[in-house]
Each structure stands twice: as structure tokens, then as C-alpha cells.
Image (cartoon, rainbow, N blue to C red):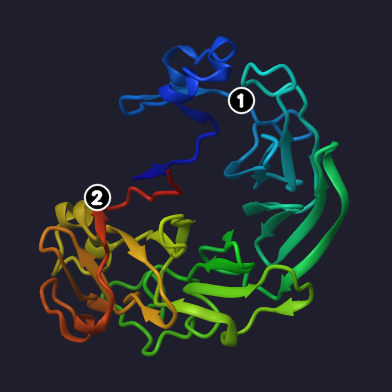
Amino acid sequence: RVLIAVSLFAVIVSFQALHGIAAHRLTCDAGNGGLTLPGGFCAIVVADAKTATGAPARIRDIAVAPNGDVFVANQSAPGGVLAFRDTDGDGKADQTPQFGTTPGNGIYFKSPYLYFAPNNRIERYLMSPASLTPVSGPDVIVSGMPATGNHVTKTIVITDSGTLFVGVGSSTDSCQAVPGTVGGLGIDPCPDMPIRAGVWQYVANLPGQVHSATGRFATELRNLVAIALNPYDGELYGIQHGRGNLNRLFPNLFTPQDDAELPAEEFLHFFQGGHYGWPYCYYDGRQQKKVLAPEYGGDGDTVGRCADTEDPLLAFPAHYAPNGMHFY
């Protein structure tokens, strides 16, 4: 099973966990902190995440250390990492230090290091269970990551063998020669491909790497925010945010209703050398097939070159923008 999440900060606890050792301490919040959850789950709001100035923090990815400490990537200025520790076992954080000086999105705990992804690099901090703040760091693991245009945030995961996977988004919505032009054609090949719009792999324990085309693992992916490793097969999965503006840019081919329903958000299995279609193709959830994008000669039905791209395992409704996923 996979949990798909939007950008809210809460701990989701199964009822089985509540019947265990911590059952007498944990009490889920009334109304699950505002979340709508499936049967068998409830939620505790760990903390109201705020910046050092007291303003609400823009947060997304969460990492949990083996001792239960929680670390959250902060996209608000001044950025960095928000740390949370529950010392009395009630599920609520009572220690909340912050560290780091750059906004970022991706975060991952691979003991004894906490990895953090500002928009233009991947860095790590040496951590200790004795402290919520770093022992040392940050060390820059990968530098030179693209941070202009659209989709500049990076999402990261690390395998047991020490491979660092990084989702790198595209610079535009559909790679038009002049973005936003009604009826405008796309650039072919899209210039994003060498260093953007895909998944990259690096060595997690090797500082000083530089982002380049040689590290590309999978390509033709518009924007991956939700990625995760499947513990069953050890492989990488994720959900692509699909393109938009079909009706606005090609009103002769697509209605407003088409624009609301297309394209699907794609749940994908990634592998070395895989190519998944963006910007040349998109997945039509109504027809259950990938079709050629209008910027590349498509009419909403023609498959063409898209027959050679990878199909999703599952298609979510258009524009849901899944931001997190977790296998359990």
C-alpha cells in the first residue's frame, strides 16, 4: 500500500500502533487536525511549524530519525531545517530548534546524517541522538543543480546501499519555444533533458560531486515532488505532476472540461534509462493511454512516438499535484 500526501504537517498513526505500548500516552487530535483520513488512521498535529520570526513556515518534506526526532525542510526565508522532539511521549513536539540558512524542499535521514536539498544543491549534516542540532556541517554532496525557471525544488531519497536519488524538475510547463504562446510549438529535443526533467543518482557519502548529464537515471519527467523507495523490491517510485493549459494554449483542440480532466498525474516505477514522455507526451486517463502533446503535433488522440514511453502503474485525476508518498 502507498500513502499519498498533500502539503500538511501531521503524524498519521495506525490504530494498531495506538493499541501498542504507547496507547496510554497518544491521543489523536479531534478531527484529526483537519485531515480527512481513511479508516484505521488518525492524526496528531506534532507542531505548528513557524519560522524564527514566528510566521507560518512553508514546509513539505519530512524526515524521521531512528530515535523519533522529526526534521522538516523549510521553504520560507530564511529557510533551513525545522527540528522537533517529543520528550514526554504525547506525540506533541516540545523542543523545536532550527538550523540552516537556505530555503529547501527535500530532506532525508540516513544515519548518522541528515540530508537537505536547497534548490541548487544537496548537503548533509552530521547528527547525534544527544542533540536536535547538527554536530557538524553542512557538507555539500552535490552542487550546481539548476534553480531557475519553474519547478526548482528537489526531492531526495537514499537507498540502503548509499545511492542518492534526486528528482529534478523541468524549467517550463510544456517546453514551448515561447512559453505561454497560444498554439506555440515545442522545442524538439527539449533543451531541459541534459540536466533537468528527470531523476539523477549520486553517491550519498561522497562530498564534492557536481550535477551533470552523466548522473541521469531516468528522463522525460516534468516534475517529481513525491518519490519513495519501495521496501519490497528496493526500487524507486514516484508521481509526476502533469502539464497544464491545454485549453488556454490550444482552444481549437481542447475544451475547458478537457483542461480540468487532463492530463492524469502518473504513478510511475523508475528504472535506469527509462523515459517517460514529457514534454512530447501526456497520459490521458480517460482513454488510458499516452498521447502526443499538441506542442509536438498531437490532436488529443494520436499516439505517435508516445508508444515507446513508459506507462504509469496508476493514474490520478488531473492537477491533484501529489506532494508526498510513503510505502507501508
Q: Earlier in the sequence, mark 2 or mark 1?
A: 1
Q: Secondary structure at mark 1?
A: loop
Q: Residue at x 67, y 45 (%)?
A: 74
Q: Nearer the viewer, residue 40 or 142?
A: 40
Q: Which x, y percent locates residue 21? A: 57, 19
- Which quadrant of the figure has residue 98? top right
Residue occupying the far front of the picture: 21
Kind of residue sitting beneath label 2: Pro
Residue flagged by tag 1: what amino acid is it? Val
Above-or-below relation of 235 to 279: above
Q: Nearer the viewer, residue 18 or 50?
A: 18
Could you say whether the residue bearing mark 2 is in a helix, strand or loop?
loop
Mark 2 or 1: in front is 1
**Between 1 and 33, the one nearer to me in the picture:** 1
Q: Position of residue 79 (x, y in %)?
A: 73, 47
User: In the picture shown, does residue 286 fall above or below 45?
Assistant: below
Residue annotated with mark 2: 317
Horizontal side, residue 149 vs residue 176: left or right: right
Q: Residue at x 72, y 52 (%)?
A: 111
Extreme residue in the right direction: 136
Q: Residue at x 30, y 79 (%)?
A: 280
Which residue is the site of mark 1?
Answer: 46
- Of the pair 172 and 326, the residue shown nearer to us: 326
In the depicted structure, whether residue 302 falls above or below residue 224: below
Which residue corresponds to the image point at 42% horizontal and 83% vertical from the top-left? 273
Q: Quadrant of the C terminus?
A: top left
